Amino acid sequence: MPEQVVFGMEVFLNGLMAGVLYALVALGFVLIYKASGIFNYAQGVMALFSAMTLVGVMNGQVPFSHLINAIFGTEIHHFGWHLPALAGILLTMGIMVILAWLVQKVIFKHLVNQAPIILFMATIGLAYFMEGFGDLMWGGEIKKLDVGIPQGINLWIDETTFNIFDYGFFIDNLDIFATVVAIFLVFALVAFAQYTKQGRAMRAVADDHQAALSVGVSLNFIWVMVWSLAGFVALIAGIMWGTKSGVQFSLSLIALKALPVLMLGGFTSIPGAIVGGLIIGVGEKMFEFLVGPLIGGATENWFAYVLALLFLVFRPQGLFGEKIIERV
Amino acid sequence: MKFKLLAAAVSSIALASPVFADLVLPWMSYRTGPYAVAGIPLADGYADYLTMLNERDGGIGGVPVRLLECETGYNTEKGVECYESTKAEGSLVYHPLSTGITYQLIPKVTADGIALHSMGYGRTSAANGKIFSNIFNYPANYWTAASAGVNYLLNENSGSLEGKHIALLYHNSAYGKEPIRTLEGLSEKHGFELTLIPVDHPGQEQKSQWLQIRRERPDYVIMWGFGVMNQVAIQEAANIRFPMENFIGNWWAGAEHDVIPAGDVANGYKSLVMNDTGSEFSIYDDIQKYVVASGKAAGAGDNLGTVMYNRSLYMAFLTHMAILKAQELAGTSDISQAEMIKGMEALEITDAMMAEYGLANIGPAFSVSCENHGGPGLGAVSQWDASAGKWNLVSDYLVADMDLINPLIQADSLAFAQENNITERCN
Amino acid sequence: MLYREAGDFKTTYREDNQTFPIKFDRYRYYAVLAVAFLLIPFLINDYWVNAIFLPFLIYSIAAIGLNILVGYCGQVSLGSGGFMAVGAYAVYKLMTAFPDVSIMIHVFLAGAITAGVGVLFGLPSLRIKGFYLAVATLAAQFFLVWIFNRVPWFYNYSASGQINAPEREFFGVAVTGANADSWATYVFCLIILTFCGIVARNLTRGAMGRKWMAIRDMDIAAEIIGVNPLNAKLSAFAISSFFIGISGALFFSVYLGAVEVGEAFGINKSFLILFMIIIGGLGSIFGSFAGAAFLVLLPVLLKNLFVAGLGWQPDLATHLEFMIVGGLIILFLVVEPHGIAQIWRLAKEKLRLWPFPH
């Protein structure tokens, strides 16, 4: 097989893996949008915030220590404990649930029936707030996140492909792990939505929240639940991305990677987020591989958007989005 | 309440503070934003050095030093605000700490007659003092860094890079593009193959770039990165098992926070430096005694001895020496902005001075002149030892290929002079 | 007492439809203009101009532009940063290519070029709606920034890709470059802003503005009653981009003087301008001014309060600033989703009746 084709296959596989990571972020957006019609720009910051909280909790950092030290002149930094990863994740999840409850209670309860753009703006405000809050709580320095996820080249794939193609493929163990987690997550979410009472209520709210309200579904509860779920997805995404690059400010920018995925897959479809993620991942990696060298590279930031734009011109509601029906 | 807040804020803008006899040193910090990891130790180092001067010596030449720290968050617009709010207080020398803000301030400080020192960043061609009267970028800049890096590789390969393949992995911005022309010139001269691999901001995702490196198997990778790009690149290099000792970052890609997230696999990673690292300098005793012990340390006080902190101490030291020189030339301790520029132009750093002030051998000895604001352009290479958790110098200070760089500096500064109708000075 | 319609008679429809139908408002408007043109230039120093007035004037122009697109025509755009970059690079190329032509002409030409680019990226709006369109405009944002970074022609092949504004004059007074006096840059931007404000106000209350609003309120219904969506949407994109291009040109040439595209015109800029119009009020020219003033002044005030006033560490202050800006945005939306302009309107309603509320 010619070298370029083998390389192309490697790039394709890595594109799929990258796509899974994008889809992980996009999933959080879909959950909230589907249930409440809110386009949650703060999803990326939630991932950052949850990862920061996880590191802080695991290392026993004292929250707001900088602020406390600045005001009271004390010198406190650590509680002096180290939690195992699982306990840390559970605690962080608890904090994300509290956060979801607060978000619902303080913000969106007061914005029911507002135009979508207003809700969108509120989430941008929320993103700003949480960015400052997270930094204030845990400090702005870069943190290492280690919950025991394997990282580095997968040797088995390297050897196997070397025997077949005479060129060992590079697949990151972290990506494989993320893929497995994403598959589990999607199945769990689908099962939850299909087979539990709360899941059914969630779908009812997504379908028509006035009708759901009239049959006795508590909107408030559902929305807190959905924000908590989104917080959970954000935590998973934060762990995956944070393991890769350390936990710091730029982590919140992964939201920008998820937006074209959403456009492509449709804002309301969970399978859409996965398929959209895969298409974007493969598309941008293949474009960078094939066309990038001709036009100077670093195309990935815009290519995903242009690709999604082209798709949209032919299917304005995304691949799996609900068909837009407009009546006058 | 609202009115009170407003009144407090307005009055604090409007009231210029009364004129004391002090030496005002502004510092444009970025303790927040995407690059805060580097900005925090930088800001701490400068602040601690000045605090130490005030506590130990009562300032410089008997005049107390006043630090004006202004947060920019690495944002150009906030940089403008900082500059405008501090320049009226008699600021002696600006450290913009961002290439964007430096470019932005170059015409402004020139018009206002204030010195600007961009140490290891900013506009490289500002080394030509004939054109850039107020801008200094000693002791080294990006172009000399690129050349020093190549010279290091030449030494490694017993003087020849013929047929070797070097990849430049760079942040796709003005900063990242700096070394390209130098490296292209060097590639022609020494016959190595150069591949340019851009990474778009912020660089969270570099799979494509590292797959390309893995396919093309360059002998060496040189990186011009910043922020999260560094950590991801080092991690990805480890993932594809690129030999770390063949991976060289520039001096903004070689601090503890760049290598620590990757853990042990970052062992052996190299970085260009313009000054030595570590906390073995005797100045640290004084900082402990006068600053840390009395609780006056800036920030959280946990950055002592890091690469960025040391670089910042070095910046403060060079500023300190320039002020001493200026005081000597002016014959007064309370120097003006114009006298500060003269002091910087006459600056001479010797080994004895570094030893005297507790920073023995932190950098090379050098001198600045009216024509040459860029110093000698020496760069060394240091290597990360992950088990000991410290950087070690692995080379001498290497002389850059000035035959190649000087014409580039000349061309770029003349283009600027032509656009802005500047005539050459120092004749 | 002063602020009321009683006794303020109108005898023609023309008078009845003017921008400021109440006499007091009209005089206030003239007074504001007089202060802005005749008083402020003599009072301000470098700090006030560079830290407060210039960003306020320039962002107001951008906010007016974006408000036309989002507030009046209902097409959400996140590409403003990219369009500002077009204006900046256009004016740079024009300034360096034709140094003898007045900078004013260059600024308007840069606006016109941006309008062209805006129409191009506005084309998908004919098929894509709502958030899908918002995200689609991000394609413009990222692509434009990439291309200005990529193609050396745009930055005249300079070594690092930064562009620098050379000194240019307007009626013999330098308005760009380092030697420009601060009052000159202020007056220059003020003239352009006044022009833009008047044009925008008159466009939005004329036939074109009514078409835009019809499209905003329901595009299918508007199409049925005879509004051509192609014309309406593309004209909104063109005019909006024209204003944003002008603001980008001023932002680079007069305000900053040197610019790197990814840093100055990144995605944050797009969001900032969108914040301005939402906080100020969608579909209101006054709201554009109010939003710009709010978001330019707030960080400066907070910074002065925390750092200079309370002596806190700047990083703590910045973190708090983020929280406060975010909190205020949320608070505004909860209390008054229609922004400062709506508060202003309500205040005026109250004032008309004051001091006899019944």
Image (tube, rainbow, N blue to C red):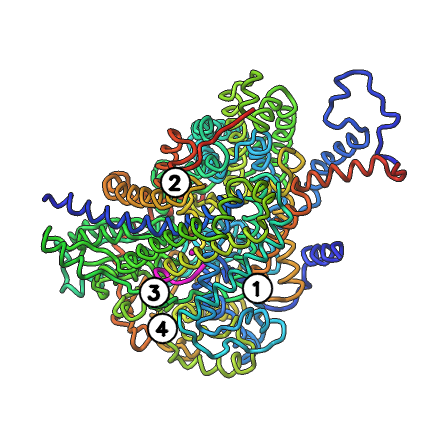
Q: Same subunit under labels 1 and 2?
A: no
As measured in the structure, the alpha-carbon distance from the residue carrying label 2 to the one carrying label 4 is 50 Å
Residue at image point 54% right, 36% down: C247
Q: Position of residue B303 (x, y in %)?
A: 45, 73
Q: Same subunit under labels 4 and 1?
A: no
Quick check: is A249 in the magenta stretch? yes
Marks 1 and 4: in contact by CB < 8 Å?
Answer: no
Looking at this view, is B315 or C327 the one in front? Answer: C327
Instruction: Read off the residue under disc 4.
Output: B277
Query: Numbered disc 3: what chain?
Result: B
Looking at this view, is A114 or A68 the one in front? Answer: A114
Query: Numbered disc 2: what chain?
Result: A
Q: Which mark is residue C184?
A: none
Q: Nearer the viewer, mark 1 or mark 3?
A: 1
Looking at this view, is C282 or B99 the one in front? Answer: C282
Q: Quadrant of residue C201?
A: top right
Is there any visible trace of residue C205 in the rendered image?
A: yes
Q: Which mark is residue A265?
A: 2
Instruction: Read off the residue under disc 3.
Output: B254
Q: Amino acid at mark 4?
A: Thr
Residue at image point 53% right, 33% down: C246
